[in-house]
Amino acid sequence: MQREEKQLEASLDALLNQVADLKNSLGSFIYKLENEYDRLTWPSVLDSFALLSGQLNTLNKVLKHEKTPLFRNQVIIPLVLSPDRDEDLMRQTEGRVPVFSHEVVPDHLRTKPDPEVEEQEKQLTTDAARIGADAAQKQIQSLNKMCSNLLEKISKEERESESGGLRPNKQTFNPADTNALVAAVAFGKGLSNWRPSGSSGPGQPGQPGAGPILAGASGLQQVQMAGAPNQQQTMLSGVQMAQAGQPGKMPSGIKTNIKSASMHPYQR
């Protein structure tokens, strides 16, 4: 009998130590949530959960140990009930239970859930019994599928976030379009030579294409001067008619340029 009592006391001491560690961890975690929520990080929360989970597993191992007696066979009976304040009880319960009276005994020595909780458990048990085996299996499969898809998405997001820091930044421009734009601005590549009606002709200075036309007209006049005068007049009238037929052209300017080109500095 004494051996069983000693074993019971040792088991109770081990349980009290485990429960005290669990209570301290819960208290520190609640303090972080209430006072350090602005700088609390997710890894710190995961560490707190891991610590609580480990302590709960240790407590379960102590309860399931072969040397631990069955506490369900032990009955606690209150010997003294008093409405007066008990200092020893205050110290043992850390100020939570000031008196041990008829009001608090049913709550602290209860071995069954509250009546409301029992009614909810009965309702859930009844609802679960109404579901057939096939329907329950389908619901289980559906829940497992949803959980698997969620885990796959979470794993994919984690892999992408890890590889995102290693990959270079995505290119936000097209090099071919950039080169085509630079060539069009710098060299006029791909631009159209069309001019709206009413624009200045190519014979005026400062307009693109005036140099080649004047050079061609000058060379044409030199060749015709070397030939017959009648051919020169015929070619001149043909150039004027061609220029007059084109919209936006000024044949008078071209005629003046051709005449001025006849005074070649090397003619004799």
Image (cartoon, helix red, strand yellow):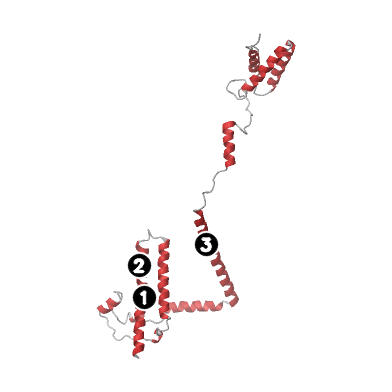
Which quadrant holds residue 153? bottom right
**Type of amino acid under label 3:** Ser
**Type of amino acid under label 2:** Ser
Between the residue at mark 1 and the residue at mark 2, the CA separation in whole angstroms equals: 14 Å
Query: Callout 2 environment at 10 Å: few (<14), some (14 to 19), or many (20+)?
Result: few
Q: Which mark is residue 28?
A: 2
If the image is split into quadrants, where does the C terminus sit?
top right
Q: Secondary structure at mark 3?
A: helix
The tally of labels here is 3
The residue indicated by pointer 3 is 155
Relative to residue 239, is residue 13 drawn left or right?
left
Query: Callout 3 environment at 10 Å: few (<14), some (14 to 19), or many (20+)?
Result: few
Q: Earlier in the sequence, mark 3 or mark 1?
A: 1
Q: Secondary structure at mark 1?
A: helix
Query: Callout 1 environment at 10 Å: few (<14), some (14 to 19), or many (20+)?
Result: some
Between 34 and 149, the one lying in front of the other is 149
Q: Does residue 201 show up?
A: no
Relative to residue 27, is residue 125 drawn left or right?
right
Which quadrant holds residue 25? bottom left
Indicate the position of residue 170 as horizontal and vertical percent values: 53, 48
Indicate the position of residue 45 as horizontal and vertical percent values: 41, 64
If the image is split into quadrants, where does the N terminus sit?
bottom left
Q: Earlier in the sequence, mark 1 or mark 2?
A: 1
Is mark 1 in CB contact (under 8 Å) with mark 2?
Answer: no
Q: From the image, state whether disc 3 or disc 2 is nearer to you.
A: 3
Which quadrant holds residue 134? bottom right
Relative to residue 48, is residue 152 drawn left or right?
right
Above or below 130: residue 258? above
The residue indicated by pointer 1 is 19
Q: Residue furthest top?
A: 268
Q: Secondary structure at mark 2?
A: helix
